[in-house]
Image (cartoon, rainbow, N blue to C red):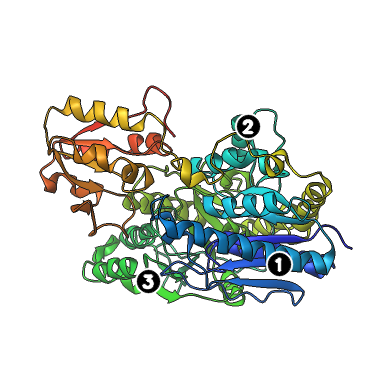
Amino acid sequence: MAGSPLLIALPSGLIVSGVAAWAARLCSALAASGRAAGLILHAPPDGHARLEFALHPGVRVFDASGLARFEDVSAMAADDPRVGAVREAWIGAYLEAARSLAGDGGGPVVLSPNLHADCYGVAVEAARREAGLVRLIGWQHNDIEYDRCVLAHYEAALSGLVGVSDRIVAALGAKMAGRRVDSVPYGVEVGDAPPVREALAGAVSGPVGARPVRLLYAGRLEHHQKRVLALGYLSRCLAQRGIGHELTVLGDGPARAELAALVEGMGERPGAVAGGAATVAARSIRLVGAATPGRVRAALREHDAFVLASRFEGLSVAMLEALSAGCVPIVTRVASGALQAIEDGANGFIAEASAEDGEEVVGAALADAVERFLAGDHGALARRAWSTARERFSIEAHARAAARVIDEAGSRAPAAGCVDWAGDRPVWFTDVGAGVPADAARRMGEVIGRLDGRAFVVHGTGAHTRALLGVLSDGAGGLVGFTDDDRQRRGGALGGLPIVGPEDAATLGATDVVISTWMHENGVWARRGVYESQGLRVHRLYGDRGGG
């Protein structure tokens, strides 16, 4: 046996995403080395394209797409009789996959649940039922408090903990004092020789015939994390500054239609540039749609720079792919990952935009960074980008580091939480409130009481708000609606009241806003200016205990 078998569960299936690409790459690399490796693939969410990845033929694929989706079950009440049956089906599928993979490579199987709390719940229940068969590894991919809370809840059942960036490792270590957390950065394929790049002189208001700078975004078209509308504003800023450019967008996702509408709208509003000429930003943007990994690699070779407007990341796989191709990354200053890979001005550029900034501000910051890129030595930047990927982020190095962690977890006795779950605490994270503190209802009631009947909106329509709908409905009739950062929820309703964007809160007749989230309260509070600019007062529930 070439090491402990690895089984990775993907709660959204094999969709276009960094985590899915990581899972496909790692399993393929391990299978190529002779290790048993497999993927449990759940049904993808609506609006997400499939990742067309050529898995190594040795990778086992366990199809769970016929089972209920995690997000659908999360919307059910915990005491809904359907929930128990659905969970049993999930657990059975995971155990069947683990038994099959153990038969290929011997046990125990190291199982890596990912991203969704219920994916972890299924894995823990499977390990509790057959502790000799399954060991669990918690792998944190994104630098968000939700992921840390899920891992903390299941910490006693985990035989290993992994973070994909230095920042994530440090934050996990602080949350779980005394617990070892391994750093295993992602890896990508890197060629044996540095890419050859042509000079870009003349792209900025240059001589007649100078070609435009070619920019690329490849990934999910999504709002909350990726802020993809910033790409449209980036193009508009470049056009207004007289910078010839072509921006190619490869990918699909729930924000595609809105990005297309923004680009089309910009085509009706040409930006004035130096000399009185005009450039239509929309003509500089191509929305290509989902692409295979091979097409993405070709596009990276064909373009000069890769742009990423993310609000947060763990360690962006797309950024690493750009480095490996010598397609110079131009990325926002996220807290995790970017500065671990990018030395500003040497192998890429950091756009000075914060997690709280809106798309238009981010677009302008990216345009500033593009200008700095154009002033540099393109060939030298590309070579240093490739060298960074070659030396630090190759798939071979990643597979070796992951294999050490997997084998160590597989060699351990079952974790205590898989043998004897602590006390009467529910195994399922979603059954303990999914980030809703025990005193949330009291705090919400106190804030509503202080409003003294004034009309208010609630920011957030997630689990925290849904758990408090009873308190909100008793708020003396002052609640007039909800706001949400997730554009996909806008236009809908909750409790019979409308959901709008934060920028439209005043249109509901509100004078006040109550932030309804514990995990993300600090982030929402930091960007409360969107409400205060409308003359609204903003209130928080957890300011005395740090929020999330």
Q: Position of residue 396 (x, y in %)?
A: 78, 60
Q: Identify the residue at image location x=60%, y=58%.
A: 317
CA neighbours of label 2 inside 10 A, class few (<14), some (14 to 19), many (20+): some
Of the pair 12 and 252, the residue shown nearer to us: 12
Residue 532 image point, x, y percent: 21, 35
Q: CA distance from mark 2 to mark 3?
A: 48 Å
At x 56%, y 35%, the residue is 424
Q: Earlier in the sequence, mark 1 or mark 2?
A: 1
Name the quarter where the C terminus is drawn: top left
Q: Given the image, on which type of amino acid does mark 3 rest?
A: Ser
Q: Which mark is residue 287?
A: none
- Between the C-alphas of marks 1 and 2, the distance is 29 Å
Judge the density around disc 3: few (<14), some (14-19), many (≥20) Cα neighbours within 10 Å.
Answer: many
Q: Where does label 2 land, which residue?
A: 176
User: In the structure shown, which secondary structural element does the residue marked by tag 2 occupy?
Assistant: loop
Q: Which mark is residue 284?
A: 3
From what the image shows, is residue 446 above or below residue 290?
A: above
As drawn, the label of residue 38 is: 1
Three-letter residue code for mark 2: Met
The amino acid on which the numbered mark 1 sits, given as a three-letter code, is: Gly
In which image quadrant can residue 439 be found? top left
Q: Is residue 321 left or right of residue 372?
A: right
x and y percentages locating residue 46 in the rendered image: 41, 69
Sort mark 1 into few (<14), some (14-19) or many (20+) by Cα contacts within 10 Å: many
